[in-house]
């Protein structure tokens, strides 16, 4: 599996990382920190036979990747164990998702993950993952006390492989995969 991911400006990264860290501290679930998951917005997930083919597709997508501002006004859950910040699915994100899907769907052996096929894609920024029932309740308390709507700027995009995360290519402003 390959991921096409958007990353944010430094202020947004710090705000979201603070909430991720606080959820880990309060709940005791350090999955996000232990696995070095930085705040990000996955635009597409797809299967491809090789990294070379995935990079070729990313090259075709690159001119469609534009940087813009998004509003992150809310939080949500994917039950039973994920809490996330939810961006507004505006024209920019909708077009981005549509454009990427258009390129990927023309790949001969490419299969887009069903949760990332427009218009059904749900934009989300994971704040806590693999949370048990009690941990999820604690995470809710954290976001209830800490989360404020965020005007975020998308500043870069990346192509990566998950498990373990391997960044294959990044365009735009580079990001650090740490909490500094």
Image (spheres, rainbow, N blue to C red):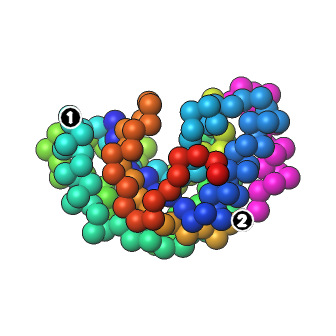
Outermost residue on the front side: it is: 180
Residue 61: tell me if it is visible: yes
- Residue sitting nearer the eye, 36 or 127: 36
Q: Quadrant of the N terminus?
A: top left
Element on which disc 2 rests: loop
Residue drawn at the location 57% of the way across and 38% of the way down: 36
The mark nearer the N terminus, 2 or 1, is 1
Specify whether 77 is left or right of 4. right
Quadrant of the image occupied by residue 80: top right
Residue drawn at the location 19% of the way across and 51% of the way down: 56
Residue drawn at the location 50% of the way across and 56% of the way down: 175
Specify whether 26 is left or right of 92. right
| Alpha carbon separation for disc pair 2 and 1 | 39 Å
Task: Indicate yes or no whether the magenta region holds residue 87.
Answer: no
Chief secondary structure of the magenta span?
helix
Estimate the x, y position of residue 114 in percent, counting from the top left.
38, 42
| 77 is higher (above) or lower (below) than 174 | above
Element on which disc 1 rests: loop
Residue hosting label 2: 149
Residue hosting label 1: 49
Residue drawn at the location 76% of the way across and 62% of the way down: 148
The residue range painted magenta reads 131-148
């Amino acid at each position: 599996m390959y991921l096409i991911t958007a990353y944010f400006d430094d202020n947004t990264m710090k705000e979201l990382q603070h909430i991720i860290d606080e959820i880990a501290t309060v709940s005791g679930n350090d999955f996000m920190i232990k696995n070095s998951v930085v705040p990000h917005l996955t635009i597409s997930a797809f299967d491809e036979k090789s990294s070379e083919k995935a990079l070729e597709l990313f090259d075709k997508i690159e001119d469609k990747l534009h940087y813009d501002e998004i509003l992150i006004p809310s939080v949500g859950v994917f039950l039973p164990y994920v809490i996330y910040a939810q961006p507004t699915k505006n024209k920019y994100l909708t077009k981005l998702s549509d454009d990427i899907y258009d390129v990927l769907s023309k790949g001969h052996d490419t299969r887009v993950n069903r949760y990332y096929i427009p218009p059904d894609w749900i934009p989300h920024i994971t704040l806590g993952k693999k949370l048990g029932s009690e941990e999820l309740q604690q995470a809710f308390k954290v976001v209830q006390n800490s989360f404020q709507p965020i005007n975020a700027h998308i500043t870069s995009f990346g192509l990566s492989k998950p498990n373990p995360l391997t960044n294959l290519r990044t365009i735009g402003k580079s990001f650090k995969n740490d909490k500094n």
